[in-house]
Amino acid sequence: MALPQQTRTDINPALQYYQSFIVVPDLQQADKDYLFTNEWRGQKLPDRFGSLIAKYDNQFRLLRQAYQQTGHCDWGIDMSFGPATLLPQLGRNKAASQMARLRVMWDLQQGREAEARDDLLATFALARNSSRDGTLIAALVQIAMENIICSSIAENFHRFSPETLQQLVAGFDSAPPRGKVADCIVTEKAFFRDWMVNKVHDLQQATPGNETKIMAAIHELIASTEGPEEGDAKPAQASLADRVANASGGTSEGVLKLLQDEDPFYQRITQILALPQAEYDAQMKLFMVDVQNSSNPFIQPFFNAYDKCTARENGAIIRLAQVRAAVEYKLHGPDGFKSVNDPLGNGPFSFHRFLFEGVDRGFELRSAYEGKGVPQVLIFVEKDGPAFRLDGPNAGKSVNAH
Protein backbone atom coordinates (compact mmCIF):
# COMPACT_ATOMS: atom_id res chain seq x y z
CA MET A 1 0.00 0.00 0.00
CA ALA A 2 1.36 3.40 -0.95
CA LEU A 3 2.25 5.65 1.94
CA PRO A 4 0.82 9.19 2.15
CA GLN A 5 3.09 11.68 0.47
CA GLN A 6 3.94 15.22 1.42
CA THR A 7 1.15 17.66 0.66
CA ARG A 8 1.28 18.58 -3.02
CA THR A 9 1.51 22.18 -4.19
CA ASP A 10 1.95 21.46 -7.91
CA ILE A 11 -1.69 20.71 -8.79
CA ASN A 12 -3.60 22.93 -11.20
CA PRO A 13 -5.91 24.79 -8.76
CA ALA A 14 -8.83 24.43 -11.19
CA LEU A 15 -8.78 20.66 -10.67
CA GLN A 16 -9.38 21.09 -6.97
CA TYR A 17 -11.96 23.79 -7.59
CA TYR A 18 -13.87 21.37 -9.84
CA GLN A 19 -13.53 18.69 -7.16
CA SER A 20 -14.98 21.12 -4.65
CA PHE A 21 -18.04 21.60 -6.87
CA ILE A 22 -18.66 17.84 -6.84
CA VAL A 23 -18.92 17.72 -3.04
CA VAL A 24 -21.25 20.72 -2.67
CA PRO A 25 -24.25 19.35 -0.77
CA ASP A 26 -27.56 19.06 -2.58
CA LEU A 27 -29.73 20.87 -0.06
CA GLN A 28 -33.50 20.84 -0.09
CA GLN A 29 -34.96 24.07 -1.45
CA ALA A 30 -36.36 24.91 1.98
CA ASP A 31 -32.85 24.71 3.45
CA LYS A 32 -31.40 26.87 0.66
CA ASP A 33 -34.11 29.46 1.23
CA TYR A 34 -33.43 29.32 4.96
CA LEU A 35 -29.75 30.07 4.49
CA PHE A 36 -29.83 32.58 1.66
CA THR A 37 -33.10 34.52 1.99
CA ASN A 38 -32.96 35.35 5.69
CA GLU A 39 -31.10 38.35 7.08
CA TRP A 40 -28.68 36.83 9.60
CA ARG A 41 -26.77 39.89 10.65
CA GLY A 42 -27.54 41.30 14.07
CA GLN A 43 -28.84 38.06 15.58
CA LYS A 44 -27.58 34.92 17.28
CA LEU A 45 -27.26 32.20 14.68
CA PRO A 46 -29.33 29.08 15.54
CA ASP A 47 -28.10 25.49 15.59
CA ARG A 48 -29.93 24.69 12.35
CA PHE A 49 -27.81 27.33 10.62
CA GLY A 50 -24.63 25.72 11.93
CA SER A 51 -25.66 22.20 10.94
CA LEU A 52 -26.38 23.30 7.36
CA ILE A 53 -23.12 25.27 7.13
CA ALA A 54 -21.20 22.17 8.25
CA LYS A 55 -22.41 20.30 5.15
CA TYR A 56 -20.07 22.54 3.13
CA ASP A 57 -16.95 21.56 5.09
CA ASN A 58 -15.65 19.24 2.36
CA GLN A 59 -16.08 21.89 -0.30
CA PHE A 60 -14.06 24.41 1.70
CA ARG A 61 -11.46 21.81 2.59
CA LEU A 62 -10.79 21.49 -1.15
CA LEU A 63 -10.87 25.26 -1.67
CA ARG A 64 -8.23 25.61 1.02
CA GLN A 65 -6.12 22.94 -0.65
CA ALA A 66 -6.39 24.81 -3.95
CA TYR A 67 -5.21 27.94 -2.12
CA GLN A 68 -1.94 26.15 -1.33
CA GLN A 69 -1.17 25.43 -4.99
CA THR A 70 1.60 27.45 -6.58
CA GLY A 71 0.88 26.86 -10.28
CA HIS A 72 -1.23 28.71 -12.80
CA CYS A 73 -4.98 28.13 -12.68
CA ASP A 74 -6.15 26.72 -16.01
CA TRP A 75 -9.90 26.05 -16.15
CA GLY A 76 -9.48 23.91 -19.26
CA ILE A 77 -12.00 25.91 -21.29
CA ASP A 78 -12.05 25.29 -25.05
CA MET A 79 -12.64 28.73 -26.55
CA SER A 80 -13.09 27.42 -30.10
CA PHE A 81 -16.86 27.59 -29.65
CA GLY A 82 -16.67 31.38 -29.50
CA PRO A 83 -19.71 33.04 -27.91
CA ALA A 84 -21.30 29.60 -27.39
CA THR A 85 -18.45 28.56 -25.07
CA LEU A 86 -19.75 27.38 -21.70
CA LEU A 87 -18.19 28.82 -18.53
CA PRO A 88 -19.93 26.64 -15.93
CA GLN A 89 -17.41 27.38 -13.19
CA LEU A 90 -18.38 31.03 -12.80
CA GLY A 91 -21.75 30.52 -11.13
CA ARG A 92 -20.24 27.94 -8.77
CA ASN A 93 -17.39 30.29 -7.93
CA LYS A 94 -19.68 33.14 -6.95
CA ALA A 95 -21.85 30.75 -4.92
CA ALA A 96 -18.72 29.75 -2.96
CA SER A 97 -18.15 33.37 -1.94
CA GLN A 98 -21.76 33.67 -0.79
CA MET A 99 -21.36 30.52 1.30
CA ALA A 100 -18.03 31.77 2.67
CA ARG A 101 -19.82 34.85 4.01
CA LEU A 102 -22.26 32.66 5.96
CA ARG A 103 -19.49 30.37 7.22
CA VAL A 104 -17.55 33.39 8.49
CA MET A 105 -20.58 34.53 10.50
CA TRP A 106 -20.91 31.10 12.09
CA ASP A 107 -17.21 30.58 12.76
CA LEU A 108 -16.84 33.98 14.39
CA GLN A 109 -19.87 33.33 16.58
CA GLN A 110 -18.14 30.12 17.68
CA GLY A 111 -14.86 31.95 18.32
CA ARG A 112 -13.07 30.26 15.41
CA GLU A 113 -11.24 33.19 13.87
CA ALA A 114 -8.66 31.02 12.14
CA GLU A 115 -11.38 29.06 10.36
CA ALA A 116 -13.06 32.26 9.18
CA ARG A 117 -9.71 33.64 8.03
CA ASP A 118 -8.82 30.53 6.05
CA ASP A 119 -12.19 30.40 4.29
CA LEU A 120 -11.90 34.07 3.31
CA LEU A 121 -8.37 33.70 1.97
CA ALA A 122 -9.20 30.54 0.01
CA THR A 123 -12.28 32.19 -1.48
CA PHE A 124 -10.37 35.37 -2.31
CA ALA A 125 -7.84 33.31 -4.27
CA LEU A 126 -10.75 31.59 -6.04
CA ALA A 127 -12.13 35.03 -6.94
CA ARG A 128 -8.85 36.06 -8.50
CA ASN A 129 -8.51 32.73 -10.31
CA SER A 130 -12.03 33.11 -11.67
CA SER A 131 -10.72 35.65 -14.16
CA ARG A 132 -7.92 33.48 -15.54
CA ASP A 133 -9.73 32.71 -18.82
CA GLY A 134 -9.57 36.40 -19.77
CA THR A 135 -13.28 36.89 -20.51
CA LEU A 136 -15.15 39.99 -19.43
CA ILE A 137 -17.87 38.01 -17.65
CA ALA A 138 -15.19 36.18 -15.63
CA ALA A 139 -13.65 39.52 -14.59
CA LEU A 140 -17.09 40.69 -13.44
CA VAL A 141 -17.56 37.53 -11.37
CA GLN A 142 -14.16 38.16 -9.81
CA ILE A 143 -15.26 41.70 -8.91
CA ALA A 144 -18.55 40.48 -7.40
CA MET A 145 -16.73 37.87 -5.31
CA GLU A 146 -14.16 40.37 -4.03
CA ASN A 147 -16.97 42.70 -3.02
CA ILE A 148 -18.71 39.93 -1.07
CA ILE A 149 -15.49 39.08 0.76
CA CYS A 150 -14.75 42.71 1.64
CA SER A 151 -18.33 43.20 2.85
CA SER A 152 -17.96 40.09 5.01
CA ILE A 153 -14.95 41.65 6.71
CA ALA A 154 -16.72 45.00 7.14
CA GLU A 155 -19.87 43.53 8.68
CA ASN A 156 -17.84 41.40 11.11
CA PHE A 157 -15.07 43.91 11.68
CA HIS A 158 -15.48 44.02 15.47
CA ARG A 159 -15.24 40.24 15.74
CA PHE A 160 -11.79 40.00 14.13
CA SER A 161 -8.68 40.50 16.21
CA PRO A 162 -6.06 42.95 14.90
CA GLU A 163 -3.74 39.99 14.24
CA THR A 164 -6.30 38.16 12.10
CA LEU A 165 -7.10 41.32 10.15
CA GLN A 166 -3.41 41.80 9.48
CA GLN A 167 -3.18 38.19 8.24
CA LEU A 168 -6.14 38.75 5.92
CA VAL A 169 -4.55 41.80 4.32
CA ALA A 170 -1.26 39.95 3.92
CA GLY A 171 -3.14 37.06 2.29
CA PHE A 172 -4.86 39.39 -0.12
CA ASP A 173 -1.47 40.85 -1.07
CA SER A 174 -0.08 37.41 -1.88
CA ALA A 175 -3.14 36.21 -3.81
CA PRO A 176 -3.06 35.66 -7.58
CA PRO A 177 -3.14 38.94 -9.55
CA ARG A 178 -6.46 40.57 -10.36
CA GLY A 179 -7.79 40.02 -13.86
CA LYS A 180 -8.31 43.50 -15.29
CA VAL A 181 -11.10 44.68 -17.56
CA ALA A 182 -8.46 46.11 -19.91
CA ASP A 183 -6.85 42.69 -20.22
CA CYS A 184 -10.14 41.18 -21.42
CA ILE A 185 -10.21 43.08 -24.71
CA VAL A 186 -7.87 40.66 -26.49
CA THR A 187 -9.93 37.66 -25.41
CA GLU A 188 -13.26 39.33 -26.14
CA LYS A 189 -12.09 40.30 -29.63
CA ALA A 190 -10.95 36.74 -30.33
CA PHE A 191 -14.08 35.38 -28.67
CA PHE A 192 -16.52 37.03 -31.06
CA ARG A 193 -15.08 39.26 -33.76
CA ASP A 194 -12.21 36.99 -34.87
CA TRP A 195 -14.29 33.85 -34.36
CA MET A 196 -17.09 35.30 -36.50
CA VAL A 197 -14.67 36.32 -39.28
CA ASN A 198 -13.33 32.76 -39.40
CA LYS A 199 -16.83 31.31 -39.50
CA VAL A 200 -17.86 33.57 -42.39
CA HIS A 201 -14.74 32.56 -44.31
CA ASP A 202 -15.56 28.89 -43.67
CA LEU A 203 -19.09 29.39 -44.99
CA GLN A 204 -17.80 31.17 -48.10
CA GLN A 205 -15.45 28.28 -48.83
CA ALA A 206 -18.10 25.63 -48.15
CA THR A 207 -20.59 27.05 -50.66
CA PRO A 208 -18.70 29.48 -52.93
CA GLY A 209 -20.92 31.91 -54.79
CA ASN A 210 -24.16 30.82 -53.07
CA GLU A 211 -24.81 34.04 -51.16
CA THR A 212 -28.38 33.08 -50.28
CA LYS A 213 -27.21 29.97 -48.46
CA ILE A 214 -24.20 31.73 -46.92
CA MET A 215 -26.28 34.63 -45.58
CA ALA A 216 -28.90 32.26 -44.19
CA ALA A 217 -26.13 30.42 -42.31
CA ILE A 218 -24.64 33.72 -41.08
CA HIS A 219 -28.05 34.83 -39.87
CA GLU A 220 -28.46 31.58 -37.94
CA LEU A 221 -24.93 31.86 -36.56
CA ILE A 222 -25.44 35.39 -35.23
CA ALA A 223 -28.89 34.54 -33.86
CA SER A 224 -27.36 31.66 -31.88
CA THR A 225 -24.99 34.08 -30.10
CA GLU A 226 -27.58 36.67 -29.16
CA GLY A 227 -28.51 37.46 -25.59
CA PRO A 228 -29.93 40.55 -23.88
CA GLU A 229 -27.86 43.58 -24.82
CA GLU A 230 -26.40 45.86 -22.18
CA GLY A 231 -29.04 48.42 -21.28
CA ASP A 232 -31.36 47.13 -23.98
CA ALA A 233 -34.86 48.19 -22.94
CA LYS A 234 -36.11 49.26 -26.35
CA PRO A 235 -39.32 47.56 -27.45
CA ALA A 236 -39.73 45.87 -30.81
CA GLN A 237 -36.09 46.30 -31.84
CA ALA A 238 -34.92 44.14 -34.71
CA SER A 239 -32.59 41.31 -33.74
CA LEU A 240 -28.85 41.72 -34.20
CA ALA A 241 -28.94 39.09 -36.96
CA ASP A 242 -31.58 41.09 -38.85
CA ARG A 243 -29.74 44.36 -38.37
CA VAL A 244 -26.51 42.82 -39.65
CA ALA A 245 -28.33 41.43 -42.69
CA ASN A 246 -29.66 44.90 -43.50
CA ALA A 247 -26.43 46.80 -42.81
CA SER A 248 -24.31 44.35 -44.83
CA GLY A 249 -26.34 44.82 -48.00
CA GLY A 250 -27.23 41.15 -47.86
CA THR A 251 -23.73 39.88 -48.74
CA SER A 252 -21.14 37.95 -46.78
CA GLU A 253 -18.45 40.41 -47.87
CA GLY A 254 -20.62 43.13 -46.38
CA VAL A 255 -20.71 41.21 -43.10
CA LEU A 256 -16.91 40.89 -43.14
CA LYS A 257 -16.62 44.64 -43.76
CA LEU A 258 -18.80 45.34 -40.70
CA LEU A 259 -16.61 43.05 -38.60
CA GLN A 260 -13.39 44.63 -39.89
CA ASP A 261 -14.78 48.09 -39.10
CA GLU A 262 -14.74 47.13 -35.41
CA ASP A 263 -10.93 47.30 -35.37
CA PRO A 264 -10.66 51.07 -34.69
CA PHE A 265 -13.07 50.68 -31.77
CA TYR A 266 -10.97 47.88 -30.26
CA GLN A 267 -7.87 50.03 -30.65
CA ARG A 268 -9.52 53.05 -29.05
CA ILE A 269 -10.99 51.19 -26.07
CA THR A 270 -7.60 49.57 -25.43
CA GLN A 271 -5.95 52.99 -25.31
CA ILE A 272 -8.71 54.55 -23.19
CA LEU A 273 -8.63 51.82 -20.54
CA ALA A 274 -4.91 52.46 -20.09
CA LEU A 275 -5.43 56.16 -19.29
CA PRO A 276 -5.33 57.78 -15.83
CA GLN A 277 -8.81 58.41 -14.42
CA ALA A 278 -8.71 62.16 -15.12
CA GLU A 279 -8.08 61.55 -18.82
CA TYR A 280 -10.20 58.41 -18.98
CA ASP A 281 -13.49 60.16 -18.20
CA ALA A 282 -13.29 62.64 -21.07
CA GLN A 283 -12.06 60.11 -23.61
CA MET A 284 -14.59 57.45 -22.61
CA LYS A 285 -17.41 59.97 -22.94
CA LEU A 286 -16.36 60.76 -26.51
CA PHE A 287 -15.95 57.06 -27.27
CA MET A 288 -19.44 56.24 -26.01
CA VAL A 289 -20.93 58.97 -28.22
CA ASP A 290 -19.30 57.31 -31.22
CA VAL A 291 -20.52 53.89 -30.07
CA GLN A 292 -24.10 55.11 -29.78
CA ASN A 293 -23.98 56.93 -33.12
CA SER A 294 -22.42 54.06 -35.07
CA SER A 295 -24.51 52.56 -37.84
CA ASN A 296 -22.55 49.32 -37.53
CA PRO A 297 -24.88 46.92 -35.66
CA PHE A 298 -21.95 45.05 -34.12
CA ILE A 299 -20.62 48.12 -32.29
CA GLN A 300 -23.19 48.80 -29.57
CA PRO A 301 -23.62 45.22 -28.30
CA PHE A 302 -19.88 44.72 -27.89
CA PHE A 303 -18.67 48.13 -26.69
CA ASN A 304 -21.54 49.38 -24.54
CA ALA A 305 -20.41 47.50 -21.46
CA TYR A 306 -16.82 48.66 -20.96
CA ASP A 307 -17.57 51.96 -19.20
CA LYS A 308 -19.88 50.31 -16.67
CA CYS A 309 -17.48 47.42 -16.17
CA THR A 310 -14.63 49.84 -15.48
CA ALA A 311 -16.75 51.60 -12.86
CA ARG A 312 -17.37 48.25 -11.17
CA GLU A 313 -13.67 47.44 -11.32
CA ASN A 314 -12.77 50.79 -9.77
CA GLY A 315 -15.31 50.11 -7.04
CA ALA A 316 -13.68 46.77 -6.21
CA ILE A 317 -10.21 48.34 -6.12
CA ILE A 318 -11.48 51.05 -3.80
CA ARG A 319 -13.27 48.57 -1.54
CA LEU A 320 -10.13 46.52 -1.06
CA ALA A 321 -8.21 49.70 -0.19
CA GLN A 322 -10.97 50.63 2.27
CA VAL A 323 -10.49 47.29 4.02
CA ARG A 324 -6.75 47.95 4.16
CA ALA A 325 -7.33 51.46 5.57
CA ALA A 326 -9.78 50.13 8.17
CA VAL A 327 -7.27 47.49 9.28
CA GLU A 328 -4.52 50.10 9.57
CA TYR A 329 -6.89 52.21 11.66
CA LYS A 330 -7.55 49.29 14.00
CA LEU A 331 -3.83 48.50 14.24
CA HIS A 332 -2.33 51.99 14.45
CA GLY A 333 -5.15 54.50 14.89
CA PRO A 334 -5.51 57.70 12.82
CA ASP A 335 -1.87 57.68 11.71
CA GLY A 336 -2.25 54.18 10.31
CA PHE A 337 -5.47 55.14 8.56
CA LYS A 338 -3.78 58.11 6.90
CA SER A 339 -1.05 55.85 5.52
CA VAL A 340 -3.52 54.32 3.03
CA ASN A 341 -4.61 56.51 0.14
CA ASP A 342 -7.87 56.42 -1.76
CA PRO A 343 -6.80 54.82 -5.10
CA LEU A 344 -8.94 57.31 -7.04
CA GLY A 345 -8.64 60.27 -4.72
CA ASN A 346 -5.99 62.75 -3.61
CA GLY A 347 -5.17 61.36 -0.19
CA PRO A 348 -6.83 59.19 2.46
CA PHE A 349 -10.48 58.24 2.41
CA SER A 350 -13.01 60.45 4.14
CA PHE A 351 -13.54 59.08 7.68
CA HIS A 352 -16.71 59.54 9.74
CA ARG A 353 -18.13 57.86 12.80
CA PHE A 354 -21.38 56.10 11.92
CA LEU A 355 -24.52 56.35 14.05
CA PHE A 356 -27.48 54.05 13.45
CA GLU A 357 -30.69 54.85 15.30
CA GLY A 358 -28.70 57.12 17.61
CA VAL A 359 -26.06 54.52 18.48
CA ASP A 360 -22.40 54.69 17.39
CA ARG A 361 -21.97 51.43 15.48
CA GLY A 362 -18.68 51.94 13.68
CA PHE A 363 -17.13 54.13 11.04
CA GLU A 364 -17.70 55.01 7.39
CA LEU A 365 -15.00 55.32 4.75
CA ARG A 366 -15.90 57.26 1.62
CA SER A 367 -13.95 57.57 -1.61
CA ALA A 368 -13.71 60.71 -3.71
CA TYR A 369 -14.72 58.56 -6.69
CA GLU A 370 -18.37 58.06 -7.59
CA GLY A 371 -18.74 55.40 -10.23
CA LYS A 372 -21.86 56.08 -12.30
CA GLY A 373 -23.23 58.26 -9.51
CA VAL A 374 -23.01 55.55 -6.84
CA PRO A 375 -21.08 56.66 -3.72
CA GLN A 376 -18.12 54.42 -2.97
CA VAL A 377 -18.88 54.05 0.72
CA LEU A 378 -18.16 51.16 3.07
CA ILE A 379 -19.22 51.05 6.73
CA PHE A 380 -17.21 48.96 9.20
CA VAL A 381 -19.23 47.58 12.10
CA GLU A 382 -17.71 47.93 15.57
CA LYS A 383 -20.71 47.07 17.72
CA ASP A 384 -23.54 44.52 17.56
CA GLY A 385 -27.06 45.67 16.83
CA PRO A 386 -29.77 45.79 14.15
CA ALA A 387 -28.56 45.24 10.59
CA PHE A 388 -28.09 48.11 8.14
CA ARG A 389 -26.77 48.45 4.61
CA LEU A 390 -23.01 48.76 4.44
CA ASP A 391 -22.57 50.29 1.00
CA GLY A 392 -24.19 51.65 -2.13
CA PRO A 393 -26.75 54.45 -2.46
CA ASN A 394 -28.61 53.20 0.65
CA ALA A 395 -25.54 52.84 2.87
CA GLY A 396 -26.43 53.40 6.50
CA LYS A 397 -30.12 52.65 6.08
CA SER A 398 -31.98 49.75 7.65
CA VAL A 399 -31.96 46.56 5.61
CA ASN A 400 -35.76 46.82 5.64
CA ALA A 401 -35.77 50.30 4.09
CA HIS A 402 -36.47 50.68 0.37
Image: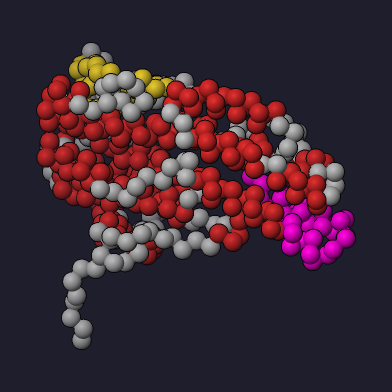
Residue 343 x/y as whole percent: 33, 28
Question: As drawn, is 111 to the left or to the right of 59?
Answer: left
Q: Which residue is drawn at 35% across and 64% down?
A: 12
Question: As drawn, is 188 to the left or to the right of 345?
Answer: right
Question: As drawn, is 305 to the left or to the right of 133?
Answer: right
Residue 222 x/y as whole percent: 71, 50
Dividing the picture into quadrants, the one containing residue 393 is: top left
196 relative to 268, above or below: below
- Asked whether 309 or 110 is in front, the reply is 309
- Asked whether 160 or 370 is in front, the reply is 370
Visible residue check, residue 49: no
Determine the main secondary structure of the stretch shown in magenta.
helix
Q: Which residue is drawn at 21% across and 50% down?
A: 118
Visible residue check, residue 359: yes
Q: Residue furthest bottom?
A: 1
Residue 238: in magenta span: no
Residue 205: in magenta span: yes
